[in-house]
Image (spheres, rainbow, N blue to C red):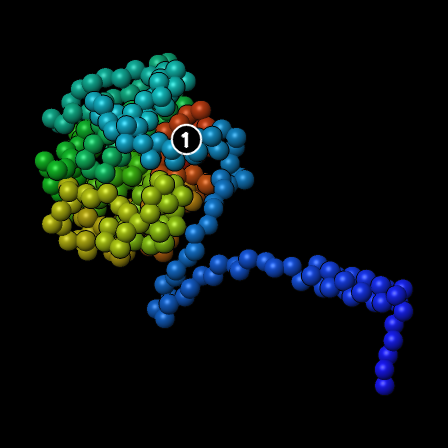
Amino acid sequence: MTVRFGGIALFILVALTLRVDRSAAQETPKTPATPEVVVSADGSLAVPAQQVPLSSYLSPEAKAYVAQHLKDMKDPAATGQENGIPRFMMGYLERQRVLYPVKMDDTRIAGVHVYVFTPEGGVKPGNAGRVLINLHGGGFSGCWPGCALLESIPIAASGGYKVVSVDYREGPANKFPAASEDVAAVYAELLKKYAPGSVGIYGCSAGGALTGMSLAWFQTHGLPVPGAAGIFCAGTGSFQGGDAAYTALPLGEARVTSPNSKGMPPMGYLAGTNPNDPLVTQAGHPEVLAKFPPTLVITGTRDFAMSNAISTQLQLAKAGVPAQLFVWEGLFHGFFYNADVPESRDAYAIICGFFDRNLGVR
């Protein structure tokens, strides 16, 4: 059988065919393949590269702060220290001195070098019988006086407290337990004037870890428990454990972890110590943690110590200690050094309020 088409009929047929072909092409667009997370037999993951924006929960000031911090962490000139102050922190310190006027006494207590901060207008009447001990951050290898100033000035001024910041011995020239001995010496001397329950102790990063070490040291050296403690940007376990070394570290410090170091700086001060020694890491020792005072734990979702902090609060709570955990969304290790950021001022208020509620008076 032969089928014949006229010219018009053939044109219509071709046009309909082309229209169908175009419609089919429009209905099935080609899309790029979605990257997949690869799961190994042991549960470890291979995560594809992705672009991570700043958290939408951050204040505008905090967004600018995080962006600048990430740039600073890529700049060796910014991270270098001058006279114990990291260069990128110098502007924060200048602002703190303007916003939070204090008097500073450079002195010694029990032979240990300390700075004693008091509000310019004097301590609050309710705090006359109270004192706070600050243990500065810096990886047990520096940041005195930079971190000590940044951690003490706003708490002294906004909380109306006397704050004693301890210039404890650090590595690599000194080894554990030199810092614990220095803190204990200062604490014992302060107890001649202040009741134990009226003394608070706190620190950030290495200073947060040293807070836990000091509380354990007090237990084994006949010193009473202080009234309250603050473990900030740290915990009572290893800095190198948990998910945060892999998830928070790149987002907060603009560097990735490595299989050996997990991205953490070496701490020569702790070289040769037993990681299971409760005087070094109190995690896993509920009998030690149970004797801690009420404890405030602070971290951020981009803090490489976040896992340590979260685990610490849980272990303290399980041991029966009144322990509070505050996690700041989108912020990094030691975020509260910049007083121009609302989130930092929130942290100061929470810290001071915690000590107000938990410290006694003589």
The furthest residue to the left: 173
| Callout 1 secondary element | helix
Of the 4 image quadrants, the one containing the N terminus is: bottom right
Amino acid on which disc 1 is placed: Gln
Local crowd size for mark 1, using a 10 Å CA cut-off: few (<14), some (14–19), many (≥20): few
The furthest residue to the bottom: 1
Q: Position of residue 87 (x, y in %)?
A: 29, 25
Determine whether 287 is above or below 327 in the image. below
What residue is at 31 percent from the left and 19 percent from the top? Answer: 118
Which residue corresponds to mark 1? 68
Is residue 24 visible from the viewing direction of this image? yes
Nearest the eye: 12 or 205? 12
- Determine the image quadrant of residue 324: top left
Determine whether 181 is above or below 144 in the image. below
Q: Position of residue 319 (x, y in %)?
A: 33, 55
Residue 277 placement, left or right of 317: left
